[in-house]
Amino acid sequence: MNGNILGEEKITTLFLKYTIPAVSGMLFLGLNTIVDGFFVGIYIGVDALASVNIAMPFLSLLIALGVVIGIGTQSLVGKYLGANNIKAANDTFITALSLITGSSVLLAASALCFTKEMAGLLGANEHLLPMVTMYIYYTSWFLPFFAIMFVLDYVLKIMGNPFYSMMILVVAVIGHMLLNYLLIVQLGWGIEGSAFAIGISYTIAFILSLLPFLMGKTSLKLFQGSFKKPLAHQILYTGSSEGVAEIGTGVTTFLFNITLMRYVGEVGVAAFTAIGYLSFIGNNILIGLSDGVGAIISYNYGSGKMERVKEALKLACGSAVVIGIGLFAVISLYAQEIIQVFIESGNERVIAFAVYGAHLYALAFLVNGFNIIASGYFTAICRPQSSVLIALSKGIVWIGVGVLVLPQFFGIKGIWLTVPAAEVLTLFLSLVLLYRHFRPKLGS
C-alpha cells in the first residue's frame, strides 16, 4: 500500500500520478461507448441506436449503484487508511462487496423477469419495443460482474494502483471492440451482439480487477473483515451524491427522450443518442479528474493535512476549466465529423439535427467541470450533503424545470439549452458551498 506516498509525496507529482491514469481510464470507458455507438449506428441502424439510448437509464441505475458504493467505499477507506485504521478499512471493503453483490443480483433478476414492462416504462414505442427489450434482457445477465468491477476499481485506486486500474479499462475497451466486430459485423447478431459484447468485455474487466485480491497482493483482503451494518449506512450515505449524479444522467436521458419523441419523433432520439456519446466522453474525462484527485484528498483529509487538500483542490479546479474549454472548442469545430461516426450516410436530417444540438449542448462544458470537482471534493471528505445538493441541482431539478419550460419559449433550441442552463445555475451553488466550507479556515 502506497499510503505514505499519498500523505508525503509532492502534491503536483501525486496529482499527475493519480489523475492521468484516472482520466485515461475514464477516456477509454468513453471510447468504449463510442465503439458501441459506431457498430450499432453503422452496422445495425438508426432504430437500434435509438433503442440503445432508450435502454440507457436502466444501465445508468446499475452504474449508479456501482458508483454510490464505489465512491463511498473509496472515501471511507481513504480516510481510515490515512488514520492508519486497517481493520476499519477492511470491514468497509467487505461491507461494500456484500452491498454491491446483493443489489446488482436483485436488479438483474428484476430486469430478467419484467423486461418488456421495463422497456415500455423507459419510453419505447411499439416500433422500438422489441429491440429495447432484447438489449435489456441480454445485458441483464452480466450486471453483477459489471457492478462489482466498479467497486473493485475504486478500491484499487485508493490502495495506490491507479495504473493497473486504468489498464483494466483499456483491456475492456479492446475486448469490446473485437467482440463488437465479431458478433455484429461478422456473425450478424444485431442488437443482441451489442449486448453480449459489452457484457463479456466487462466480465473480463471484473476478473482482472479481482486478481490482485485473489493473489494476496493488496493491503485489503477478501477474506478478512466482516459486514457491518453501520458501515453499510456510511458507505451509502457518503456515496449518495455520486449516485444521484448517475441517476441524474438516467433522468436526463429519459426526459430528453420523452420530450424529443413529442417534438420531433425517432429522429430526435437518434440525434440525442449521438450527442449523448459526445457528452459521455467529455463528462468521463472530468469525472476521471475528480476520481483521481479524490484519492489524494480523502487520504490527506483523514491525516489532517489540510494545506495538501487545498493544493490538490486548486489543481483540480484549474485543470477542469482548461479541459472544459478544450472540449467546447473540439465539439464546436468538429461536431459534424464526430456525429457522422455514429450515424450512417443517408440520414442527413438526423446528422444535421444532431450537429445543431451539439453546438448548443457543448456550452455546458465551459462550467460543468467545476461542478463535478466541487461535488467530488465534498464526497472525498465524507460530507455528502453538499455533494447531493450539487448533484440534484445539475442533474434533476434544473433539468426537469428546463425541459418543461425552455421548449415553450425557444422550441427545439430550448431542449438543447437545458443542460447548459442547469450547469450555469449549479455553478453558483457550488461556489457558495465551497466558500462556506473554507470560510472558517481563512483566518487560520
Image (cartoon, rainbow, N blue to C red):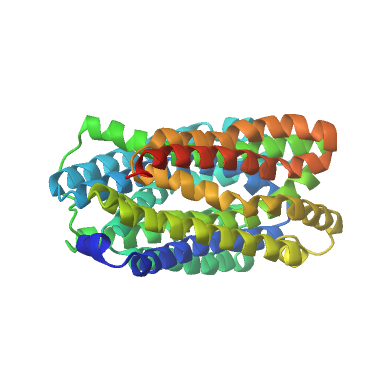
Please tell me which residue lies in front, 206 or 155.
155
Please tell me which residue lies in front, 357 or 51.
357
The reply to whether residue 2 is visible in this rendering is yes
Query: Could you tell me which quadrant the C terminus lies in?
Result: top left
Query: Relative to 73, does residue 347 appear above or below in the rendering?
Result: below
- What is the x, y in percent for residue 362? 69, 54
Q: Residue at x 35, y 68 (%)?
A: 163
- What is the x, y in percent for residue 263? 82, 36
**Does 349 sit left or right of 339 as displayed?**
right
**Does 278 sit left or right of 313 as displayed?**
right
Query: Could you tell me which quadrant the N terminus lies in?
Result: bottom left
Q: Residue at x 34, y 64 (%)?
A: 11
**Does 102 sit left or right of 391 as displayed?**
left
- What is the x, y in percent for residue 171? 43, 68
Q: Residue at x 59, y 58 (%)?
A: 282
Residue 225: image quadrant is top left
The reply to whether residue 66 is visible in this rendering is no
Q: Residue furthest front?
A: 443
- What is the x, y in percent for residue 304? 24, 48
Please tell me which residue lies in front, 5 or 262.
5
**Does 78 sit left or right of 167 as displayed?**
left
Q: Residue at x 23, y 30 (%)?
A: 229
Residue 427: image quadrant is top right
